[in-house]
Image (cartoon, rainbow, N blue to C red):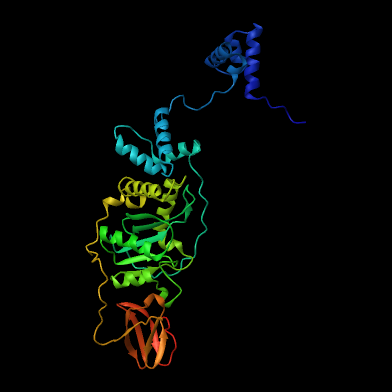
Amino acid sequence: MPWKQESVMDKRVKLISDWLSGSYSKSQLSRRHSISRPTVDKWIARYDAKGPDGLKDLSSKPHHCPHQTSDEIISRLLEKKNEHLDRGPKQLIHRLRNAEPEIAWPAASTAGAWLKKAGLVSTRKRAHPRPHGAAKLREANEPNQTWCADFKGQFRTKDDRWCYPLTITDHASRYLLLCKALPGTHGEPTRQGFEWAFREYGMPDVIRTDNGSPFASTGLARLSSLSVWFIRLGIYPETIKPGRPDQNGRHERMHRTLKAAVLKPAADNLMRQQLVFEDFVHDFNHYRPHTALGMKVPSDLYSPSPRIYPGYVPAAEYDSDVDIRRVRSNGEIKWKGSHIFLGEALIGEQVALKEVDDDTWDLYLCTYPLGRLERGAKRVSSL
């Protein structure tokens, strides 16, 4: 049978028991229990003050932490978060510091911990890594090199009507150029939204979208009536790969912010929803700092394009070394005795055929490549 080991608490209880018996002086207790005289005094004093609880080990936690966040600071942080539920700790602390720089606001990580403790942070699902295929997308490091566009998922306003938000952003600066509440994704209202943006901000070099309607189609070169209009204005329509929304990731991130900020709940009708969108656009561009921009706001980096929208579609111009054909009302051209179908999106347009080899021609709309045509072929093949 093993020897019974005496705990530290047992030794303290035995010390106090001997003291209370009256048979020992403090000096004798010191020698009997092999401890110093001050230690005897300490445990007797703690027993007199708190009884048996005084013999327990005290917490090593400091009574005061100079870096502890005050209740007032926490209250202000939670109040600001409740005003802007879509903002994270970095944005909240950045805005609070700008408004009241004289206050020692905590670090964003500390603010995040308090928000999480208060139940104001929703845990985001971890995204599975996507395969990184080669993306033939043009670089856009300056404003107006590339604009990104999409429709945020549709929802119903309180009057039970559908709302399809058309959104356009500048890729480099994240500036939100347009957030328009539309009743659908039809081509003409969408075109009017872009036309407003062109008049307000000028024209970009590239417009990047997904492959859905009205931006693209299943026809030749995936062109739609809208993308044909872009080409005629000298804008290159660029589509991401199907199933790769990460290729338009900055725009998708803005959509997440938009949904959190203004779509819970939806407004009474489209007109009121548009007013909510306009408030969001102003705040997003001028007051919301972005980590990727070094905590600057988009308006700090964006400036309108020098490419002025002419208000009309210029005539298509081609070099003299090409053959020109007009696309007929049935979507066809006549070439070398054959009727070649190009698609409805190109009806009425003049296209150019440039010979690149014996009996082989490349087909263009302005400078945009449509495909390759060989003698005797019944359709245009991809380049």
Q: Is residue 305 left or right of residue 368?
A: left
Q: Is residue 217 left or right of residue 362?
A: right
One can see residue 76 in this view:
yes
Q: Nearer the viewer, residue 140 or 370?
A: 370
Q: Furthest-right residue in view?
A: 1
Q: Nearer the viewer, residue 322 or 69?
A: 322
Can you say which quadrant of the picture contains the N terminus?
A: top right
Question: x and y percent of residue 258 in the render?
Answer: 41, 50
Q: How many marks?
A: 0
Q: Nearer the viewer, residue 178 or 294?
A: 178
One can see residue 141 in this view:
no
Q: Is residue 266 above or below residue 143?
A: above
Q: Is residue 81 above or below residue 290?
A: above
When asked about the image quadrant of residue 163, the answer is bottom left
Q: Nearer the viewer, residue 302 or 268?
A: 268
Can you say which quadrant of the picture contains the C terminus?
A: bottom left
Question: x and y percent of residue 224 in the render?
Answer: 40, 71
When asked about the image quadrant of residue 362, the answer is bottom left
Q: Is residue 322 above or below residue 94?
A: below
- Residue at x-position 25% and y-position 79%: 317
Question: x and y percent of residue 155 in the render?
Answer: 48, 53
Question: x and y percent of residue 158 in the render?
Answer: 48, 47
- Residue at x-position 44% and y-position 41%: 85
